[in-house]
Amino acid sequence: MNTDTELDVNVLVVDDLVQNLLAMEALLARPGVRVIKAASGVEALELLLLHEVAVALLDVHMPEMDGFELAELIRGRDSTRHIPLMFVTAAAADQQRQFQGYEYGAVDFLHKPVESHVLLSKVNVFIDLYRQQRQIRLQNARLSETLQLNEMFVAVLAHDLRVPLTAMSLGVRLLRDAGHVPPAPALLDRLEGSTSRMARMIDQLLDLSRIRSGQLTLALRSHDLASAAQQAVQELDPGDTGRLVVSSLGDTNARIDLDRWQQVLTNLLGNAMTHGQPGSPIKVTLDGRSAHMITLEVSNRGTIPADKLPELFQPFKPCLDAPAKPRAKGLGLGLYIVHQFVRAHEGTIDVNVSEAEDTTAFVVRLPRAPVSERPDALSAAAQLVRQP
């Protein structure tokens, strides 16, 4: 495990004489530069497993394993072959030895006693080069993260807007089938509600970028979770087939961001309708008998394969269909979004699968009021765009 700070640059010094190690440390160490000392080649190899280094200074003459042998082993590892190697020797200048050093990958060959300003100048070149390379890696990582975020925006848009769009399509179909019969007010209300939800979801895509910068707060208000569940059921089952059944116990009021909580509900219900046993009832149970916690359970017939459980809440994963059921096409974002928004409310979500009863239940435990309503309370939700 690497214990270095993010800003430190490590310089490896390998010498079998303690006084030489201490002298090198005194010369090279300073704020932001850490000297890692090794008294043998074996110790040096062990340290390179733990630390990244900008440059390595190797004493040529060491017992058991000399500097050339150590250099050969360093060059033989994929993780260390890029490290610049500087050989340091007390022997008289020998052109043949220098050629041998360069053959083993040396970038420089110094003879003791080494002029301190010369050594410091040469080492600083590689420290600066390492810092530049690290900065490039960080910039590339940020660019990759930004590209992934843009892809996620499009994916969320395609995935989550399907639910209200489906409700609207069904409503239009019912109106068309009704012919000259005046449309029912309730049906028009559902169409208007679905349209509004689509607009809110588009706004929520922009929220993701604000989450990343810590500028977004949950719009926490007191709401009845049972009423929110009924609204989600009406959108998903406009024909009132009775497949979605909502029941509640106790006080189901809590401080939530209603838009995001509705997204949690519709994703859980939509997942159950898509991947559960066709035609079987889906039970939505809210338990508000606890003074501090409300429990939501969405259960359906059918089970999730055991090998899919570890990746259940990860983004862009395949649909979690039972083996015997044809695979439904999807982007694999629904449960990932549910997990992140539940965490943003400081709640938890688990899945209980019973092979004996052939059931799957998602259980959400939500505090009635989050401990903190500060902007940094959304740090958990920020993982929505930061975790793969």
Image (cartoon, helix red, strand yellow):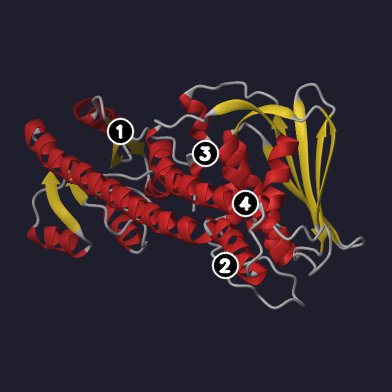
- Residue at screen point 23% across, 32% down: 24
Given this view, does label 3 or label 4 mark the residue nearer the observer?
4
In this rendered view, identify the residue nearer to me: 374 or 195. Answer: 195
Q: Mark 4 or mark 2: which comes first in sequence?
A: 4
Few, some or many residues within 10 Å of mark 1 (<14, 14–19, 20+):
few
Q: Is residue 309 visible?
A: no
Q: Mark 3 or mark 4: which comes first in sequence?
A: 4
Q: CA separation, marks 2 and 3? A: 22 Å
Q: Quadrant of residue 8?
A: top left
C-beta proximity under 8 Å, tags 4 and 1: no
Q: Mark 3 or mark 1: which comes first in sequence?
A: 1
Q: CA separation, marks 3 and 1? A: 27 Å
Given this view, does label 2 or label 3 mark the residue nearer the observer?
2
Q: CA separation, marks 1 and 2? A: 42 Å
Give, as a three-letter code, the residue at label 2.
Gly
- Residue at screen point 22% across, 52% down: 84
Per the image, the residue denoted by label 3 is 381
**Badge 2 element:** loop
Give, as a three-letter code, the residue at label 4.
Arg
Given this view, does label 4 or label 2 mark the residue nearer the observer?
4
Per the image, the residue denoted by label 4 is 190
Q: How many marks?
A: 4
Given this view, does label 3 or label 1 mark the residue nearer the observer?
3
Per the image, the residue denoted by label 2 is 330
In this rendered view, identify the residue nearer to me: 104 or 334. Answer: 334
Q: CA separation, marks 4 and 1? A: 55 Å
In this rendered view, identify the residue nearer to me: 330 or 240. Answer: 240
Few, some or many residues within 10 Å of mark 3 (<14, 14–19, 20+):
many
Is 167 positioned to the left or the right of 53 in the image? right
Per the image, the residue denoted by label 1 is 7
Given this view, does label 1 or label 2 mark the residue nearer the observer?
2
